Image: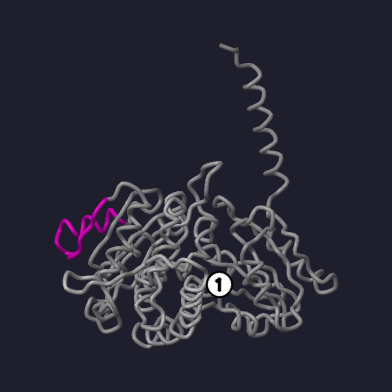
């Protein structure tokens, strides 16, 4: 095992290399291109014995990935933002084929307006596709999650593709110390892939056939649901083995200072590191607050969340996404997980859209709202984390833009 400074993108590429993937269909898009550049270099050097092919779009890339996985090849591919949603049709198709593969998404906010920094509307748009989803907080977790994702995807009780998500820019281009296990160590954890069924010249197989009428369609869709449910148990076992072998432990969720917490903040992905720092600051002034990080988004660990949050005095969910017309997506998911008992008062906050940074004063506001919610009962109405100074700045920019437009002579 060695230790290197790697970006999140490089850590993801190392995950694919250590998994000894066979086939890598790619299409470039910022901020994930560094992943495929690293893999392409290793293939060219001969240090990675895989076939890497640049396709003409993300839709073609995902089609090739699913088709190759159907033959029994171990497949890795990656995308981001507009690319992921351009290939969205194929996510449903690949999951329906029940072929294991790993797709990396380097999250980036969706246009319009176009931007380059992250939020999670791209990856959460795929949450109903049948792909399982693991959301990583650190560069080390990115590499480890790719290895765990192959074990999960190829598990006989699961056979569903897995999407590993990391935040664009904040994690994709940030260098952190990463422990690289040896190929031999990884082979003991992740043996070569032996497909349960696959196409070959001498083995004809029909897959993804039409099922006219709802009877067959309902049957196969519910098989996928049962497989995703089985993935919760499989993930626990895989995570336990990974912890014993490599000393790094990952659950479906991560608890941070939750043991005696009266108040809980729920977050996901790399901005959870900011949340942990703020929880430590609030603890120093006497607030009994903790943080729950959502790591496994699909399948959603309802029972564990209910057990961890059910007896708190109030819970705030911070979504780095927005479902227009509803609010935070993960707020709704957490609320549904608490349906089986009298839930604590819940609050919904939306922040970090387009990579907007969180401020300490915003966590002070959230803390005050948690105290008030104990008596008020919480609210489903989302609160946008956005300062008055930002609002005034935007109004000034719009005023200048309107002046410029008014002064432009007509042609």
- Residue beneath disc 1: 294
> Which image quadrant: the N terminus?
bottom left
The colour scheme applied to this rendered structure is: one colour
Q: Please tell me which residue lies in front, 123 or 46.
A: 123
In this rendering, position of residue 334 left or right of residue 201? right
Q: Is residue 386 above or below residue 296?
A: above
Q: Is residue 217 above or below residue 398?
A: below
> Which image quadrant: the C terminus?
top right
In this rendering, position of residue 182 left or right of residue 214? left
Q: Please tell me which residue lies in front, 193 or 247.
A: 193
Image coordinates for residue 241, horizontal then vertical, percent: 38, 87
- Residue extending farthest front: 213
Image coordinates for residue 410, horizontal then vertical, percent: 59, 12
In this rendering, position of residue 68 left or right of residue 331? left
Q: Picture quarter containing residue 8?
A: bottom left
Label 1 crowd bin: few (<14), some (14–19), many (20+), radius 10 Å? many
Q: Please tell me which residue lies in front, 158 or 374.
A: 158
Secondary structure of residue under mark 1: strand
Residue at image coords 50%, 50%: 117
For the record, the magenta segment spans 36-54
Q: Is residue 320 above or below residue 280?
A: above
Q: Please tell me which residue lies in front, 333 or 382.
A: 333
């Amino acid at each position: 095992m060695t230790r290197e400074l790697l970006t999140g993108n490089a850590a993801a590429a190392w995950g694919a290399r250590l998994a000894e993937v066979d086939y890598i269909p790619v299409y470039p898009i910022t901020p994930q291109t560094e992943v495929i550049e690293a893999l392409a270099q290793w293939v060219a050097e001969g240090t990675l014995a895989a076939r890497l092919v640049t396709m003409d779009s993300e839709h073609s890339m995902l089609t090739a990935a699913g088709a190759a996985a159907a033959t029994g090849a171990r497949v890795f591919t990656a995308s981001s933002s507009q690319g992921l949603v351009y290939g969205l049709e194929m996510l449903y198709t690949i999951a329906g084929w029940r072929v294991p593969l790993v797709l990396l998404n380097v999250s980036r906010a969706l246009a319009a307006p176009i931007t380059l920094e992250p939020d999670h509307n791209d990856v959460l748009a795929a949450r109903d596709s049948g792909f399982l989803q693991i959301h990583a907080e650190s560069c080390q977790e990115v590499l480890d999650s790719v290895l765990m994702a192959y074990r999960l995807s190829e598990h006989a009780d699961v056979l569903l593709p897995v999407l590993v998500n990391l935040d664009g820019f904040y994690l994709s281009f940030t260098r952190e110390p990463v422990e690289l296990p040896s190929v031999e160590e990884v082979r003991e954890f992740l043996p070569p892939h032996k497909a349960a069924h696959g196409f070959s010249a001498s083995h004809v197989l029909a897959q993804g056939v039409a099922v006219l009428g709802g009877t067959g369609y309902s049957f196969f869709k519910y098989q996928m649901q049962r497989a995703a449910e089985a993935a919760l148990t499989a993930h626990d076992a895989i995570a336990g083995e990974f912890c014993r072998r490599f000393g790094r432990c990952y659950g479906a969720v991560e608890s941070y200072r939750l043991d005696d917490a009266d108040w809980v903040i729920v977050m996901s992905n790399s901005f959870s590191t900011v949340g942990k720092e703020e929880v430590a600051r609030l603890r120093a002034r006497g607030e009994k607050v903790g943080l729950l990080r959502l790591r496994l988004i699909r399948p959603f660990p309802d029972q564990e969340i209910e057990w961890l949050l059910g007896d708190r005095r109030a819970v705030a969910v911070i979504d780095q996404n927005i479902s227009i017309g509803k609010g935070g997506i993960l707020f709704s998911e957490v609320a549904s997980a608490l349906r089986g008992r009298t839930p604590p008062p819940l609050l919904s906050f939306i922040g970090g859209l387009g990579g907007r940074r969180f401020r300490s004063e915003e966590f002070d506001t959230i803390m005050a709202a948690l105290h008030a919610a104990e008596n008020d009962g919480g609210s489903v109405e989302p609160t946008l984390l956005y300062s008055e100074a930002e609002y005034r700045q935007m109004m000034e920019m719009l005023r200048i833009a309107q002046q410029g437009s008014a002064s432009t002579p007509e042609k």
